[in-house]
Image: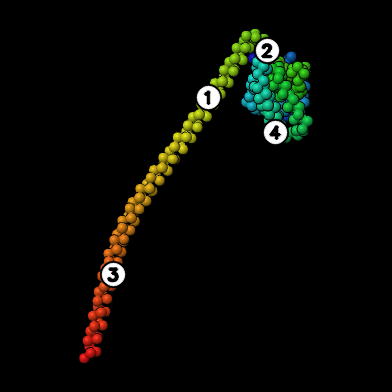
Amino acid sequence: MTSADGFDAIAAELYARPPGDFTSARNARARDLDGPLAAQVKALRKPLLAAWVVNLFAREDAAQLGQALELAAELREAQADLDAATMSRLNRERRALVRSLAKRAAELAAERGERITAATVEAVEQTLNAAMFDPAAAAAVTSGRLIRPLQTSGEGTADLTDAVAGSLDVTPPTAQAPSDEVSARRERKQAERAVRAAEEELERAERDRTDLERRIRILIEREQSVAEREKDLRAQLERVQAEATRLDAERKDAEKRRATSEDEVTRARSALDEAKRALGGR
């Protein structure tokens, strides 16, 4: 480890401590060191509250911060490609993510007993926003050694003068790609969007097919049920028709027998009248 690395590590450790403990912790750390490194540590300035909140967040929740900076890289790539649709989407995501990260950073600070005002949260948002636009500001934020909060200028860059303790490893921006390379990248993005659109269309078509197959199965089941009911009803109708035919035949037979019975009654009545007359004549 070089002396610069050692100093950076000590500074990051001190700048993550509560602001109220910074001065005593810095002096104690300097007493444990010798030579130029001790002088460097002794000269460290106490961070402003918003800078300390960002340092704490960079140390405690590096994963979320990394996601934000990945989004920032996508945003810068979209700017280079002049992809307006992607620019609009990423800008919305950036604003929402910066607000969410600033809120989380403030919560971490509050959990450690610090009183965080709206003005401090706003300064934290501005610092994180600067990191989204400026790679140097991003390196400053991830270092965990901010002394003061950051702001971007009209050109999207941040003034880092006296803003960071120790060294700052900033990857130099790549040269602007030639127009044919930009065109090829744009065509690739268009092709990727076409693939995503085709995949979504395939997914929709497969979903529709699945729905129709499910509908057909339901209709087949209902059709089979209705066919069974029809079969039962036909059998019942046949039984009823047979019963009706039988009753009709019995009725007709009973009517014939009734006619014969009426004739017998008439003959019997006549015979009775004749017998009564014969009896009365004696």
- How far apart, in angstroms, are the residues tagged by discs 1 and 3? 86 Å
The label on residue 258 is 3
Which is nearer the eye, 146 or 66?
66
- How far apart, in angstroms, are the residues tagged by discs 1 and 2? 35 Å
Badge nearest the viewer, 1 or 4: 1
The label on residue 173 is 2
Q: Residue furthest front?
A: 281
The disc labelled 1 sits on which kind of residue? Answer: Glu
The label on residue 107 is 4
- Please tell me how many numbered marks the rendered image carries: 4
For label 1, the residue is 199
| Residue at screen point 76% across, 29% down | 122
Q: Check whether the beta carbons of the residues at disc 2 and disc 3 lie within 8 A of each other.
A: no
The disc labelled 3 sits on which kind of residue? Answer: Arg
The answer to whether residue 125 of the structure is visible from this angle is yes
Q: Secondary structure at mark 3?
A: helix
Q: Is residue 161 placed above or below 112 in the rendered structure?
A: above
Within 10 Å of disc 1 (Cα), the crowding (few <14, some 14-19, many 20+) is: few
Badge nearest the viewer, 1 or 3: 3
